[in-house]
Image (spheres, grey):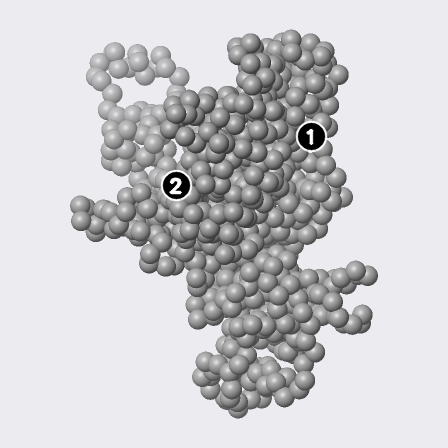
Amino acid sequence: MKVFLSTIDIHANILSRVALHRDYDKPVWAKARADARQLIHDVLLMDVQQTSLVITATCRFMGHVALNKPSNKIPGLSARTSLWLNVYQSIDYQDPQEISAVLHLVSEASHIDTLNMKTFEKILSLESVGEAYTNGGAVINAINNTLSSMRIGFLDSVKNVVDYSASSQLMDLLKDPRVGKAVTLLLLAPVDDFHSTAKSLIGQVFNVDGRLECVRALLENLPDPSLDGLVDFLNKFCAYAPSVPEACSLSKSLVRCFTDVIDALCSKPDGLLHSHRFPRYDDSRGPASRMIELWTLMSKAIAVIFKRTPAWSIYFDNTEMIEWMRDALIFGRDMLAQWQVIEGAANAFWQNQRKKSQGKADIFQDLSAIKKKMISCFQDVISELTRWLRLTDEELLHQSFSLLQSLLDLFRKTGIRPCDAVLQKLTKYVDSARNDIDQIRSRLDTSRIASLEETLSSFNDDDDEIEIVSVKTIPRQEKQVVRVKNNLKPPILKKEGKEPRSGAPDYVKPWSSYFTDKDKAKLERSVPPMPTLKKDKFLPVAPANQRSLSQKRKQYHNNEATSSLGPRDYSDLSESDSETETPAGGLASLAKKFAKSPKIKKPVQRRQIKTLDTQAENAALMRMQQREATYRAKMRMRPDVSGLHRVLLSWNYDHDGPTPPGFNGPLNFVPDTFSTVDQFCAVFEPLLFLECWAQIAQSKDETPEIFEGKISGKQYIDHWLELDILFEANVRKDYYLTETDIVLFRHPHTNKCILAKVKSFMSNYQNLQATVRCYLNTGVEDPGLHIGTSWRISKVFRYVLLYFLCLL
């Protein structure tokens, strides 16, 4: 093999020229050219496969070194450097077959970026790594040199094809499924040359610019090969990222490109899944049929990123990691926000395919199974996202916690329970963070810990058993145990004036488990009824500071527990009665009477009830106390006025009239006193809305101060859309925004607008940044709030928080 490869290196120039150059495009050379092309393809594919094999062997070798275990040697690697370059230089733009072959070859290794020497520092100085290398550093150099030989000249050769080809010719080239898939892989690649090559080719064919536009153009015009490329890329990532010391560049490319993929598929109103042509519900291999596969792989990929990032972070500075970690969280947010769109496409496809063959009930059963499968894909995401709650960067910590909270809320709303391992992990984290005063193990503040604990408590629906042991002192010291089982459920946050419902506790009769039917019949026939004991006489008495809690949680019924003596006690007590029976006649009876000493009747001791205080050891009551403390802590926090924000931000700023859009509330006189909270709200809520709308109408008559701002990031939280805004030039130094400001976003070209509430504002010497929140729901149209778009921003009015608090 070495001799053969050496021959290829020597004759690389003439071999590539005969196979690809136009001078040999003659019938007499046809057979030789076909054989030469196949040989070149096989040799270059061998380079790609061998490179991947050596990388895997190197990572496995380094893992064995870290564990002090023997390992196999790393195989040799020698690339056909001159052949790669000659092939690129000999490509003819009029030969689509060879262009297709080259694009396919390069795309096979497009996901592998240059290896970082720092990540392999443990083996750089080792000498016994393989026969073909002097040390570990030579292995990394050989891999990087091979990867470099695959890239040098590739961008220039494809640009030469693009410059000298018509758009129709390139379109015919992209229609080849193998080429469409290869171009998609190159567009997702972390290598700049590959990424730029794909953008130039797509831009020339579809007249688009930018990554998002290129992704959308591929999906819209070449849906099947594009989805093949997306699925192949995710599979390669899930196999490659866990096996190498770090894959940050590949992860960065994935989260950014797939954020654009989700935007192109699901964004309103022009997302591809919202159209009628793209999904092809009647096609068994159409895009809609592959949504579940794509969703599953995306969930698996984001879970790998959350899991592997702590190990990757030791090789990079914080500033290098923060940017793409933020992109990873945005990708997770976009997935969470658009899962229903993908679910709708998958459901519509399945319903269209199975509607004729099955009944309606079976259809809905499978439709619910699709939703359960999609949400269950987030199980690993939640488990691995917990690692990011230890971040020191405040913005990343906030976004990580928000994503975790939103995932748990999704599980709760859909009725799907997270796996026990996830709940145990999060519960352990909360318990540790509650006692972590110095915030060594957790960076979350008290309010967020309380919010997370409250969310976790909603999944704790297990029945807790309270054992109340009563010890009865009877003549022979026989003991009976009475077990009372109460359904203790998590506290429900109720509105003022309403009491929680409580079910009647289920009591087990004392003798149902201890006596046979024969014993019970005997007792009922021979023993007079005993006085019944009220339950409240032997239940443990709670301390004074906990009685109110117990009364609210459980209303015990005055059931009676019947007490009776056992069979042995009955025989002892009836022994004295047997002495009064008529004795037998004659001397035998007389001798029996005098031979036995007189029987003294034993006094029957008074039965007593002893109670054991098991409250200190009762885990259920401890959890109830913790939840009550969490509820009280939440009530002391800043009140939630998001309901009023939703009303304000749903208004159309361009609406004309004295009342806000959709306003139909009656105006009532203000009475001197209010009997209920609902009456207070009914009076003041319409007045508050009219006051806010009056301020908005007044702002229309004034000359607003308008600044240009660009959207640098966005994330979804339920129906809210949070935008990161970077103000552009010409902003005065003393300009500022507060959390009570309502601002207007207006597109400079389409003139569409939307209201937003300021969440945070930051000013420094270089730029001004702000985070705002918009409300997107049914009836509120997204004017096109995409990342990278510019908007005209003006302040509308500033509300007074006291107005909001008066309605709570």
- Residue drawn at x 28%, y 44% is 284
In the rendered image, the vertical position of residue 691 relative to residue 418, given as above or below: below
Q: Is residue 651 left or right of residue 733?
A: left
Res 726 label: none
Residue 572 horizontal/vertical position (percent): 36, 25
The first of marks 1 and 2 along the sequence is 1
Residue 551 picture location, percent across and down: 51, 56
Reply above or below: 526 against 631: above
Identify the residue position indicated by label 2 in the image.
Answer: 176
95 or 528: which is nearer to us? 95
Q: What amino acid type is highlighted by mark number 1?
A: Asn
Q: Position of residue 495 (x, y in %)?
A: 51, 65
Q: Secondary structure at mark 2?
A: loop
Residue 518 in sight here: yes
Q: What residue is pinned by disc 1?
A: 116
Location of the C terminus (image quadrant): bottom right
- Viewer-proximal residue among 616 and 763: 763
The answer to whether the residue labelled 1 contacts the one labelled 2, judged by CB atoms less than 8 Å apart, is no
Seen from the viewer's position, the closer of residues 795 and 618 is: 795
**Residue at 46% in and 51% down:** 166
Residue displayed at 61% across by 56% down: 713
Residue 644 visible here: no
